[in-house]
Image (tube, grey):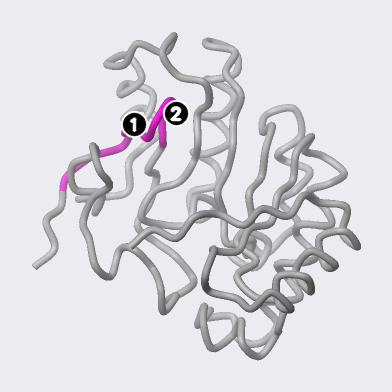
Amino acid sequence: MKHTAMTILYEVHDNLYVNLTNKCPCACTFCLRQTRESMEESGPLWLEHTPTLDEVLAEFEKFDMDKYAEVVFCGFGEPTEALDVLLQTARFVKERYGKPIRINTNGLGNLVNGKDIAPLLAGLVDTVSISLNTPDRKKYYELVRPKFGEQSFDAMLDFARECVKYVPHVVMTTVATTLTAQEEEQCRAICEQLGVRYRIRPWED
């Protein structure tokens, strides 16, 4: 049974994470939320309802913002599913606390929102981290199971290409131990071509 709560903000290491939505256009075979309800210190991350902007901003009053290196939009859903609240929250965090802002995303925000959202991130978001997962279009579809079908892989790459124009740091990630060395080299080549940084992140079970 899913335990729901209103865990909107939670700590991971030195950063404060923002959990805006449970909606996601993907059903990744490896998704953490299939096997757990929370992260180490977070409380349940399944939200009772999608929080309003007022609810999100009120939560920041409960935290000592001086403690955190970065504010990261990343929870149990895809942050760009709540784009308006994400952008307004990012503006609030920048103006009030001056903190660097990162979005961890599957890179399908343009498909989710039916428009190119990269220009909207300009001046608000410092880092976009996109889950590349695999260099292979067919394998991506099998792993990520996006509701938008096989166009999703190219849409994700297009989003990364656009983000480079508006966001200082664009990173694409794969997970250690899930790819062959050859596949990792193919991912590195894709990232070089797009002008983004490639990062192999540690496996979390």
Q: Position of residue 114 (x, y in %)?
A: 67, 64
Left/right placement of residue 41 relative to residue 86 reads: left
Categorize mark 1 by other alpha carbons within 10 Å: few (<14), some (14-19), many (20+). Answer: some
Q: Answer whether residue 59 is magenta in the image.
A: no
Q: Considering depth in this image, is 151 or 34 the residue closer to the camera? A: 34
Circles 1 and 2, Cβ within 8 Å, touching? The answer is yes
Viewer-nearest residue: 70 or 82: 70
SS majority, magenta:
strand
Left or right of 3, for residue 87: right
Q: How far, Cα to Cα, is label 1 from label 2?
A: 6 Å
Q: Quadrant of the C terminus?
A: bottom left
Height in image: 37 above or below 143?
above
Per the image, label 1 sits on a secondary structure element best described as strand
Q: Residue at x 49, y 55 (%)?
A: 202
Number of marks in the image? 2
Side of 28 where 172 appears, left or right: right
Amino acid marked by disc 1: Glu
Q: Which residue is mark 1?
A: 11
What is the residue that sits farthest to the left in this orientation? 1
Q: Nearer the viewer, residue 126 or 35?
A: 35
User: Residue shown at 72%/41% (left/top)?
Assistant: 120
Quadrant in which the N terminus is drawn? bottom left
Amino acid on which the number 2 mark rests in the picture: Asn
Query: Which residue carries the number 2 mark?
Result: 15
Please tell me how crowded label 2 is: few (under 14), some (14-19), or many (20+) other residues with Cα within 10 Å: some
x 20%, y 50%: residue: 48
Does residue 8 show up magenta in the picture? yes
The magenta segment: 5-17
Image coordinates for residue 93, horizontal then vertical, percent: 53, 20
Label 2: state its secondary structure: strand
